Amino acid sequence: MIKRKDLYLLLEVEPEADEKTIKKAYRKKALTCHPDKNPDNKDAVALFHELSDALEVLTDPSSRKAYDTVLKARKANELRIRALDGKRRKLKDQLEQREHEAKFEEQFTRKSDEEKLAMEIERLRREGSKQLEEEQLYMREQLAKEAAAAASGGEQHRGREQPARVKVKWSKSDDSPYTSESLERIFSKYGTVSAVVINKKKGGSALVEFNDLSSAKMASTIETGFVESPLKVKALFSEEASIPVLATHTDSRTIPQDNDFESLVLRKLRQEEERKRLIAQMIAEDENS
C-alpha cells in the first residue's frame, strides 16, 4: 500500500522536506484524526494508520531513499503517459515497439526497487520505529492534556469499567519473531500498553493490556502482525463497554515526577501482582479453550 501512495502529499510536505518539517506535519494531521478523538470513525482510524506509516518510512534515511526511488519512477511514468497528446498518441504503437526490448529491463529494475522498499518497511516493523514511538508518546500526552482541561473543575477520571485486554495467538516455532518487547512495540502504536504476558507454559499466545478501551478496540480490529507469522487478535472486553474520559497517567517506563521512593516501591509491587494475575488468567483461559 505504501509504494502506491504519495506519502509527501499525504503529510502535505515537499519531497525535499527535512525530518523536523515532516514530524511537525505529522503531528498537525494526526491530532485531528487520532482514534481517541474519533472512536467510531473508521476513515479517521485508517488515515491515522497511514500517517503513522508515512512517518516511519520518511524519518528513516534508508527506507526514505528506497521509497523516493520508487516514487520518482512512478511519477516519471505518469508524466510520460500524460504527455501523450493527440499527435503523439498516433505514434504510440511505434514507440512501444521500439521500447519493447527495454521493457523487461525496466520492469526488472522497478521490481527490484519495490522489493528494496518492502525490505526496508519490514525492517522498520521488526526493529520498531523510534521516531514513531516518540511521536505517539507526544500525541498521547497532548490528548491527555486536552482531556484534563475539558474535565469539570480539572477533575481526572481514573479507572475503567473493565480491563482493556486482547489475546493474541500465533503459530509456534523455534524462530518465532514474537517476544514481550516486539509485541509491545507492535501494539504501542494504538495506545499505551500497560502489560504484555506471554504464555511460556504452552507458547504461541499472549495477553496484551492497554490503558484504555479505545486502544484495545482498535488493535483487535486492525492488527495482523508480521506477514510471515500472522497474529490472531481476540478482544477480551465487551463492545458495549463505555470509554471513560482520558486521564493523565504515569507510564511505567518514565521517571515518577514526585521522586517518592515509597510510592515507587508500592507501585512496583502492584505491577508485579497484576502481572501474576494476568499469567494465571491466561493459563486458565488456555486450559478451558
Image (spheres, grey):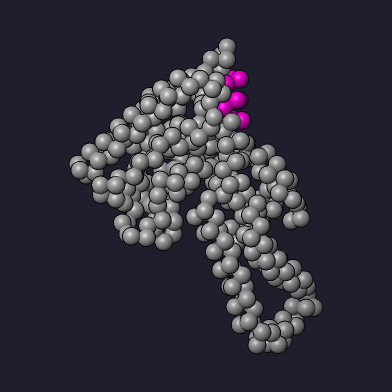
Residue positioned 61% across, 35% down in the render: 138
The image shows residue 254 at horizontal and vertical percentages of: 53, 32
Whether residue 26 is visible to the viewer of this picture, yes or no, is: yes
Q: Is residue 42 left or right of residue 229?
A: right
Image height of 216 relative to 18, above or below:
above
In magenta segment, residue 157: no
Residue positioned 72% across, 45% down in the render: 20
- Front position in the image: 260 or 94: 260
The image shows residue 277 at horizontal and vertical percentages of: 30, 32
Quarter of the figure with the C terminus? top left
Q: Residue furthest front?
A: 261
Whether residue 47 is visible to the viewer of this picture, yes or no, is: no
User: Which residues lie in the magenta part?
Assistant: 142-150
Residue positioned 62% across, 49% down in the render: 55
Image height of 160 relative to 76, above or below:
above
Image height of 100 relative to 76, above or below:
below
Image height of 172 relative to 287, above or below:
below
